[in-house]
Amino acid sequence: MFSPYRCQICGETYLGSDAPDRCPYCGAHGRWMMGAAEWVKTGKVEMSEQSYEDCMKAIQLEVGNAAFYKCAQKNAQTQVTQAIFKRLQKQEAEHAELLAEMAGVEEPDLPDEDCAGNDDAQNLADAHDREQRAIQFYLQVADRAPEKRVQEVFRALADIESEHLKISNIYR
Ligand SMILES: [Fe+2]
Ligand SMILES: [Fe+2]
């Protein structure tokens, strides 16, 4: 049946005959896709100083990575690398947006970020390093955050970035 679904991590909605295997917007695993009626609104979270600081750092990391993928996408040499970088750009921008909402701040604009021009292999190698840094930081945040929602979001993000890392490994 054609129905509305909603992602419990980023809050985006999806219309389709089945829940997708990954959220098409943030990349969260399909288990986070709820029927629209079952979805629970989360919004801004009152959080500890440490969690707030971690969220701010994560937002900078996400917009930096979104800008990097935007550059890599513009310069991509094949349809395959372009498809990968294009989706990663959108997903990282979605991550910045959901973190900003959780922290109750405005989402910053994408910075001017460089990539290795039209060198796809180098961009995939750099993507690997960026994703690795994000995963390490997010797991650290999830471990020290006292708020359940902050833990949930950072664990989900670490899972998504692990899949980004995997795809950067497959194609480099
Ligand atoms: Fe991300
Ligand atoms: Fe990523």
Image (cartoon, rainbow, N blue to C red):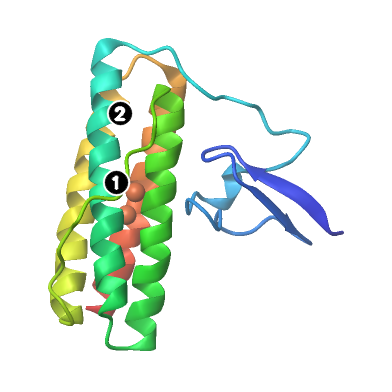
For the point 39% across and 50% down, the residue is: 93
Q: In this view, does 69 lie to the left or right of 13?
A: left
Identity, as a three-letter code, of the amino acid under mark 1? Glu
Q: Work out whether 59 lies above or below 104.
A: below
Q: Quadrant of ligand 2?
A: bottom left
Q: Does the residue labelled 1 lie within 8 Å of ligand 1?
A: yes
Residue 127 at what x, y percent from top left? Answer: 21, 63
Check residue 62 in the rendering and tell me which mark sits there, or answer none.
1
Residue to which mark 2 is pinned: 55
| Quadrant of the image containing the C terminus | bottom left
Q: Work out whether 168 lies above or below 1.
A: below
SS at mark 2 in the image: helix
* First reached walking from the N terminus: tag 2 or tag 1: 2
How far apart are labels 2 and 1 at the CA level? 10 Å
| Quadrant of the image containing the N terminus | bottom right
For the point 28% across and 64% down, the residue is: 69
Identity, as a three-letter code, of the amino acid under mark 2? Cys
Residue 26 at what x, y percent from top left? Answer: 48, 50
Of all residues, the one furthest to the bottom in this rendering is 78
Task: Judge the density around disc 1: few (<14), some (14-19), many (≥20) Cα neighbours within 10 Å.
Answer: many
Tell me the quarter of the picture where residue 58 sits: top left
Q: Identify which residue, 59 or 156, lies in the foreground.
A: 59
Q: Work out whether 4 lies above or below 144.
A: below
Residue 105 at what x, y percent from top left? Answer: 39, 26
Q: Is residue 61 left or right of residue 99?
A: left
